[in-house]
Image (cartoon, rainbow, N blue to C red):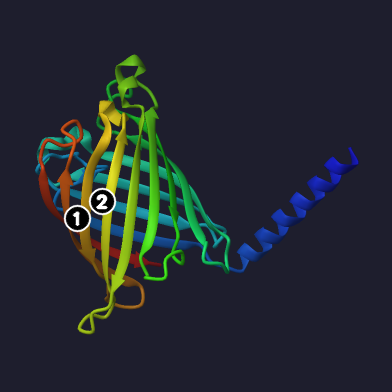
Amino acid sequence: MKKVLISLIIVLFLGISGFAEAQEKELGITFDLSYWSKWLSKGVQAYGQDGAIFKTVDLDFYGTGFGLKVTHRNSTSSGHVDAQRFDYRPYYKSSLFEGTKYLTNYNVSVGYEHYPGLARHKANTTYEWIFGFSWPKLLDSGIVPKYVAHYEYPASGGDAFNHITGWVHRFILGYNINVPQLPSPVYLSTEVAYSDGLGGTAHDWSYFTTGLSTKFAINENLTFIPGVYYQLSMEDTVSKVDDIIYTVLSMKYKF
């Protein structure tokens, strides 16, 4: 009993200390408006050949590592009205092994995906867990390896949507290329993914993506991020289109 009380006192003290420290920081609010010429969702062309608009509000809770993202996404074409979607995603991000070459940044989140135009029993409404890790100091070359795992399963709809349940594993390498003519480095990314049954897909390597992006600071709060990407599809159950080129144009405003 004594040990339990001591443990509770320690936890309570740490919680109060963390809250007091957080009170010295402000609530972070970032608004992101993004255009995708094609929306590639884990390798799948979710709106076919049509593009998508993403509107996201990201709340950073006083630098505690906890946050919440709310996203509305819709197609640029009227042919996908019922496929517009809201995502509600609380998350926690932090680091391990700070001060060493094994520094590990991680972000764990769970999202609820809601289709407002459809009844719950007809909609592909899901929960999605995302586990993201990166190792910015592991390689002396400046290449940053990342691993992202997605696990998704139906939130409603009964047996009709059981086939949705599954994983996607993404293995990513990122590298910043300094270009004297640009205000920010050009970020080169490469990614290969293994689809593990999500949405009824085959258990196989499913796509390879490479891309370039950079940042332009419009002012202290506003940033423009353009990017161009190429996806090589390797599994027909994910995408029957072998070669896909798309652009992403994003404007971020930090309040």
Front one among 200 and 223 = 200
Q: Secondary structure at mark 1?
A: strand
Position of residue 121 measured from the top left corner of the image (x, y, whole percent): 32, 20
* Residue named by callout 2: 54
Identity of the amino acid at label 2? Phe
Question: Residue at 55% across / 61% down in the picture?
Answer: 62
Query: Horizontal placement of 35 versus 102: left or right?
Result: left
Which quadrant of the figure has residue 198? top left
Position of residue 144 measured from the top left corner of the image (x, y, whole percent): 38, 63
Position of residue 174 measured from the top left corner of the image (x, y, whole percent): 32, 62
Q: Which mark is residue 218?
A: none
Front one among 133 and 218 = 133
Q: Are marks 2 and 1 in contact (CB under 8 Å)?
A: yes
Q: Which mark is residue 35?
A: 1
Taking the view exactly as shown, the residue that stands out farthest to the front is 140
The quarter in which the N terminus is drawn is top right
